[in-house]
Structure formats: structure tokens, C-alpha cells
Image (spheres, rainbow, N blue to C red):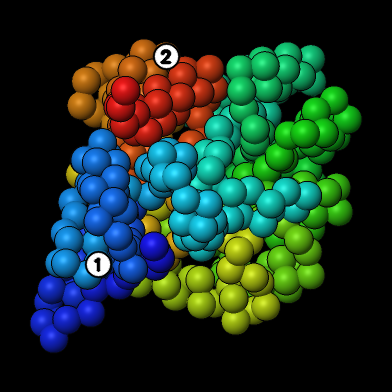
Amino acid sequence: MKLSEKQVVTENEFVNTVFSDLTNRQQQIILEFTELSSENVESLIVILKQFDAIYNFDGFSLTCIIQLSAISTFKERINDLDIQEQLQKIVQNHAVIWQAGRFNLNVSETPLIYGILNVTPDSFYDGGAYFDQEAAFKQVEKMVADGANVIEVGGQTTRPGGFVEVEPEEEIKRIAPSIKLIQKSFPQIVIAVDTYKYEVMKAVVELGVDIINDVNAFTDDNRKLELMKNSNVGLLTMHSSRDVEYHDLTEEMTKFFEQNLSDLTNAGIAIARIALDQGIGYAKVADGYQDYAMMRNLDQLNYLNRPIMVAISRKGFGAKLFNLAKEDRLSVTLIAESFMYLHGGRILRVHDVKETVQLVKMLDTINTAFWHR
């Protein structure tokens, strides 16, 4: 028995497009088994039924469509070492890897719980709560204990409705102590910084952070490109449409990311270092209909094969839809995050780490539960 991954290629271009789109958005693959004995066919069909897989046997080969998330469990149920090895190679070929500073993060295998630490007086949700170092340290301790594998330090808010820009020196002064604290006390934690200023980026690269999150997508200042090129830092590049009125959101967003990825890689930055953020909350009308459309169309970006961030924690849609105060928005945040996680968002940027860890574990358990005796 032999196994290969199959691409749908027919004379009908529309059929090809449909299959390519569906498998990308639904995170599925097509497998073809050949050189089969009758026993092989019978046992494969029994297993495929356990996985609710669509399959067809034409007398010579058996073709099936199966969820990528099911492959590890599927592999365990096939009693053929060669096929198991081939399945493992297929999983590796589809793995979405983020090279970020000291870390090589396989987000297909382990989603990132990305805890937010705002050392600012005016962030929209927790401004002022962790402005002093003792409070910041206690919050980092809590997030790590709750299961965060990334801590992002932010020294200036970019909240909608206007914000006060601070000088780079002040921003560095705010964030540097927390960066050093995490490095010393929690060396296993990935350290990110949320900034759009070149001077701050330069300082935190020298401090040894692993990720920089830029709401301006790194392309507004050529010095950023040169700095990133000569570092090993992971880039979280964000799409923003605060100054843009879209006619076709999905098409224009995909064009933005295609161009942005091209600009970054042409500047000498490896694509494996880049992750994407749709920029929910950064639409021209904050918390408007465009934000919900971005939540829905996240899977349209799966074809780019880059990690995608879900960054909606406690945001204003909870007030817009349900008139909820910021401290009461956890439940609606978790509901929206669940939808986006199941559609391909593998980095969850959150204020509430413990609850998000539970969300991921519950959804992963359900998504890989294929019953058999």
C-alpha cells in the first residue's frame, strides 16, 4: 500500500478553484491510497468512517478528504509503519512555523496563548493597572501560571477614538523593566513588544525580545525594514483600515497582506518570521460591521500559510452589540475567539489567559475526538 497527497486537477477550472478554496479554508487535505489489497481497502474504509471522512474507491485507488487536525489520530489507527511515516511527512509539510527570536514556534501543533501586559496609564481595558513594577510582576506571574506562552509588553496605547502619543524615550522607559523582569524570571516565555516606533524597536531588539507587533505593518519607515532584516525577531504585521473605506473587504485585505508579505520578504526578511493580524478594531468605523466581517473571513487568509492572530480581547463589539462594560465582556470575547480559532486563528492575544487556555483545550479535544471501540 502506498500513500500520496493529491491536488485536484481537472479540465474544469471552476471545480479546481472550489476544491482549492475549500481545502484551504477548512484546513483539509486530499489523500490517495494506491497498490491496495482487498484487506487494505476494507480496513481503510472502516477507519475513514470513524473519521467521518468523504472517500471514494474506484477499484484501483482510494481517495479521501480529511481534516488536518485529525491526521495525528488517524495515523495512530493505521497499522502500517510506512504509511504512518508518510502521514507524518504530510503533517510536517503543512505545519505553520513562526521563527521568532529564540523560538521556533509550530502554531499548527501548539497554539500561542499571547498574554497582554500594558504598562500604560491609558490602555482601553487595563490602563494604569500594571503601571508600577510590582503590579506588572504579579500580573506576569499570574499569566505564566495560567498558561501563557507569550507575554506582550505595551508602553503606548493605540486604542480607537484617539490616543496620546508618547516620546520613544518614555515608551522605552516604561517597557524595558518588564522585558528584563520576564527574561530573568521566566526565560521559557516568548517576549513580544507592541510598538510602531523605529527607535523603540531598535531598543528592544538590543534587549533581546522575540517578537515585535507593529500596527503600521513595518512598511512606513525603511529603517524598520533594515533593522528587522538584520535581526532574528518575529514580525507581527497588522492590517489597518482606519483611513480606508473598502468596497470589497476580503479582496482588499488579501491584497494588502500579499503586498505586505512581498515588501517584507523583498527587504530580506524570511517569510517564516512573519505572522498576520487582521486589525480588528482598526476599521474606519471602530466596532462596526467591518470588524464582524473580519471575524467571519479569517479563513480566507489560510492560503497564505502564515500564523494568524486573533486579537479581539474585551474590545468594543461587546458594548456595541450588548451594551457591556469592558469588565463584563469576557463571555462574548470567548465566543468570538472560538469561532476564529476554529477557522484558523492560532495566536490568541488576550487579557484573560486562564479562560483562553480552557477554550483551546476544550475545542482541541472536541476537534480531535473520533470515536471507536
How far is disc 2 from disc 1 in space, using C-alphas?
Answer: 56 Å
N-terminal-most mark, 2 or 1: 1
Q: Is residue 109 left or right of residue 290?
A: right
Q: Nearer the viewer, residue 255 or 298?
A: 298
- The answer to which image quadrant residue 162 occupies is top left
| Residue at image mark 1 | 61
Query: Is residue 280 toward the left or the right of residue 17 in the image?
Result: right
Disc count in the image?
A: 2
Position of residue 110 relative to residue 218, above or below, is above
Which residue is identified by label 2?
327
Q: Is residue 95 visible?
A: no
Compared with 112, 238 (above or below) is below
Residue drawn at x 40%, y 65% is 2
Asked whether the residues under the numbered discs 2 and 1 touch, taking CB atoms below 8 Å apart as contact, a structural biologist would say no
Amino acid type, callout 2? Glu
Label 2 packing within 10 angstroms: few (<14), some (14-19), many (20+): few
Q: Position of residue 115 (x, y in %)?
A: 59, 30
Task: Name the residue at 80% across, 54% down.
Answer: 205
Residue 329 position in % (x across, y down): 36, 19
Left/right placement of residue 143 relative to residue 248 reads right
Under circle 1, the secondary element is loop
Q: Quadrant of the N terminus?
A: bottom left
The x and y percentages for residue 25 are 28, 55
Give the residue furthest to the bottom: 11
- Residue depicted at 41% across the width and 45% down the height: 78
State the mark number for residue 183.
none
Task: Name the amino acid type tagged 1.
Answer: Ser
In the foreground, 304 or 59: 59
Q: Secondary structure at mark 2?
A: helix
Mark 1 neighbour class, 10 Å CA radius: few under 14, some 14 to 19, many 20 or more: some
Left or right position of 320 against 114: left
Task: Give the residue drawn at x 49%, y 71%.
Answer: 260
